Image (tube, helix red, strand yellow):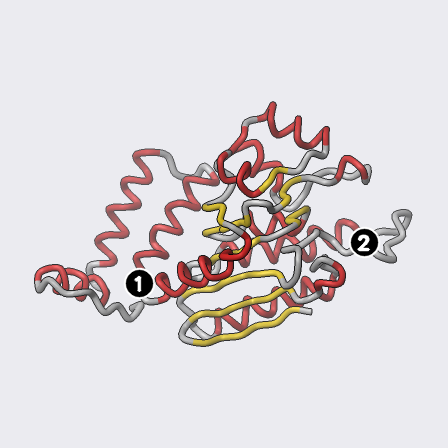
Amino acid sequence: MIELDIADGIARITLNAPQRLNALGPDDLRSLTAAYSDAEAAGVRALVLRGEGRAFCAGRDIAGVDPATDDVSGYLDGLVTPLLQRIAAFPAPTFAAAQGAALGVGLGLLVATDVVYVAEDAKIGSPFAALGASLDSGGHWLLVSRLGPHRALDLIYSGRLLSGSEAVAGGLFSRAVPAASLQDEVDAAAASAATGATQAFLASKRIVAGLRDGTLDLWSSVAAENAAQAALRDTADYREGFRAFQEKRPPRFTGV
């Protein structure tokens, strides 16, 4: 079950099937995609993704799946990849709180999210060595780009999972925090972003995406920064930020 709550300019999406560790079947993926669409239509200025219970998301729900007739392409190409692309392109800062297992497509949800806080004792990685399947949902890109090919293949071949603390130390995610304070930390970060200069954040998000996918290098990213700054000059938040600095007061950003 996917739940969406919107309040104070922040969307909170909850994976709420703790009895199956928030594993995602086709209907769950469709509902999750719809939740992001609804949050975008509402014009929120930040979004938080979380999982209810002892796991963030254990990956695909394979209960009842017959491997002989499994439509794996329909699941991955038709449902997972479009969802991850929608998350990555969401027009506001996105945050995720991950406790317990974050595996397979659950790991992919984190790859596509802007800022990821994980519990120190979370379990992150590729469980596929025991399934005869390969890592998917952007997992190869994440492990190779952050850990290098040797460590990535070591984790894939062995099936060893990283703790949240190990994952952050390796540069996979943003912060590792005690499980008891995970949600509070993410909520505070999202609340801060929701009162920030949204258009400036989105300009940086686009530049980071270009650097990540290789369409930008050093000098083209500098050019993109210059163009972004020139465009932001015409926003209300740019003018407000300058005035607040000059008047020695906190800025009051509206997101436009």
Identify the mark at residue 44; answer none if there is no mark: none
Q: Residue at x 55, y 36 (%)?
A: 166
Give the x, y percent position of residue 44: 43, 70
Find out whether the residues at labels 2 and 1 contact each other: C-beta distance under 8 Å.
no
Image quadrant occupied by the C terminus: bottom left
**153 lies above or below 31:** above
How many numbered dots are placed on residues in this image? 2
Image quadrant occupied by the N terminus: bottom right
Q: Residue at x 81, y 37 (%)?
A: 132
The residue lying toward the viewer, choosing from 113 and 228, is 113
Most extreme residue toward the top is 150
Give the x, y percent position of residue 176: 49, 46
Which residue is identified by label 2? 62
Q: Residue at x 49, y 57 (%)?
A: 181
Tell me which numbered mark, 2 or 1, is placed earlier along the sequence.
2
Which residue is identified by label 1? 196
SS type, badge 1: loop
Mark 1 is on which residue type?
Gly
SS type, badge 2: loop
The residue lying toward the viewer, choosing from 48 and 54, is 54
**1 lies above or below 75:** below
Q: CA distance from mark 2 to mark 1?
A: 41 Å
Give the x, y percent position of residue 167: 54, 39
